[in-house]
Amino acid sequence: MAQKIRNPLAQALGLVLQNTRDKMGGISSSEIASLLNLAASHYRMIEAGSAILQPSRAIKIIQTFDTIEFIPLCQVLIAIQIIDSAKDSVEDMRTITALLKEANPSMSKVLEKFDNLWSTIKSKEPAQVSRQLVTDGIVKELETFLTTEPVILTAEQIDNFMTPTYRYPMSGQLYSKIGNILQGVAPFYLDTVLQLVDNLKGITPRVTAEELAKWESRHKNRISHIIGIVRNPEVILGVETFDYSFLWEENFQKMLIIHRDPPGDKTVSIQNQIAKHLRKRFETERIKYERELEIFDKVIKQKLLISHGKQNKEKIDAILLHKQIPMNNLWVYLMNNGYVVPFIDNATVDLPTDNLYGTSLAYDETCEKLTFIKEVCADAGFTL
């Protein structure tokens, strides 16, 4: 039994990088490491297959090794991560590799060559595995894959990547997204794209009420759900400033609003107040809103849900906390394509608009808040 199991695809990639480096006029591993912003010792481990290369390094790799194509590289790096999740067991790695071969036909020529390698991985040292990677033609096949422009996949193949029957994440959506994003983009511009992403990370978007309204208007036919977590329920009564007309969009399914504090007038339903004000507004422009008025009561009943989150005040306070500053409202837009777009603001009923602060949350903060939001929504009888 080998002392240490290594990820065979990572080993093969390391050998490809080493061969490519040798073809670049004998450039040293230390020089390559410097170009990739990695420690020399860490890069040597990558070439040896004892450390994996993170997908975030993909652009740096193609900048350094100009024969390697971006989309195939991303596929390989993600496949390495998936296989690495089962590195403690040769059988599990074998199973995942078989699933990857089925899920991503474009890599099948590479992955099918691993069939004769598993017994060596189980019983031999990593150095012997590396030799077999070369003699069995795996390194050569992987090098060909990495240096060949990708074939655009069919819709059927992309759909197969997304099939929910697989036990492991096959990342088919990411493969297709990479192709869609970069299709037609010259590699010359990749530096610009990377610079743009880095710059955006340091900018906090400041979103005014008007800007949010314009964003809603532009995307209203792409929104499937809206979840509002608000401190004061009266803030949602302004039907003149808050556009509820997307409730009548065909693709829109539900709007759930959960408020932390009780309404000022506990004898009147917040939902009834919204319905009353909104109907009055539509009636003043009956010609424009004739279709909405015909099915008004049905839409309000089926698509607008409002709940008092009195049992979840602490969770709501956590949801409305942004960079240690208490905010008043969080709006989460679930898009038809699966994206989640959150906005958080400090708006109140009597706050002047020039003192309004709103922003859209970063990915990590969005994930953190969604955990609490799902729990609060479940308590309100709404399953995400």
Image (cartoon, helix red, strand yellow):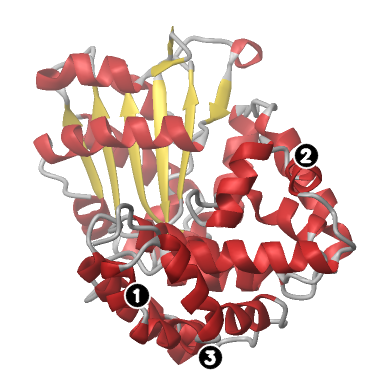
Q: Is residue 218 left or right of residue 363?
A: right
The spot of residue 255 in percent (x, y) is 31, 47
In front: label 1 or label 3: 1
Give the quadrant of residue 41: top right
Residue at x 72% of width, y 56% of height: 61
> What numbered label is drawn on residue 279?
none
Label whose residue precedes the other's in the sequence (1 or 3): 1
Mark 3 or 2, nearer chain start: 2
Q: Amino acid at mark 1?
A: Thr
Q: Secondary structure at mark 3?
A: loop
**Tag 2: residue type?**
Ser
| Mark 1 surroundings: few (<14), some (14-19) or many (≥20) residues within 10 A | many
Q: Is residue 24 left or right of residue 16?
A: right
Q: Which quadrant of the figure contains the N terminus?
A: bottom left
Q: Is residue 206 above or below residue 51?
A: above
Give whichever of 160, 37 is nearer the camera.
37
Residue pointed to by mark 3: 154
SS of the residue under disc 1: helix
Please, what is the three-letter code of the amino acid marked with disc 3?
Thr
Q: Residue 296: x and y, percent? A: 30, 57
Is disc 1 in contact with disc 3, using a CB cutoff of under 8 Å?
A: no
In space, the residues marked 1 and 2 are separated at their CA atoms by 32 Å
* Label 1 or label 2, whichever comes before in sequence order: 2
Q: Which residue is mark 1?
A: 97
- In the picture of the structure, the residue carrying the numbered disc 2 is 34
Q: In x, y percent, where is residue 263?
A: 22, 17
Determine whether 192 is above or below 263 in the image: below
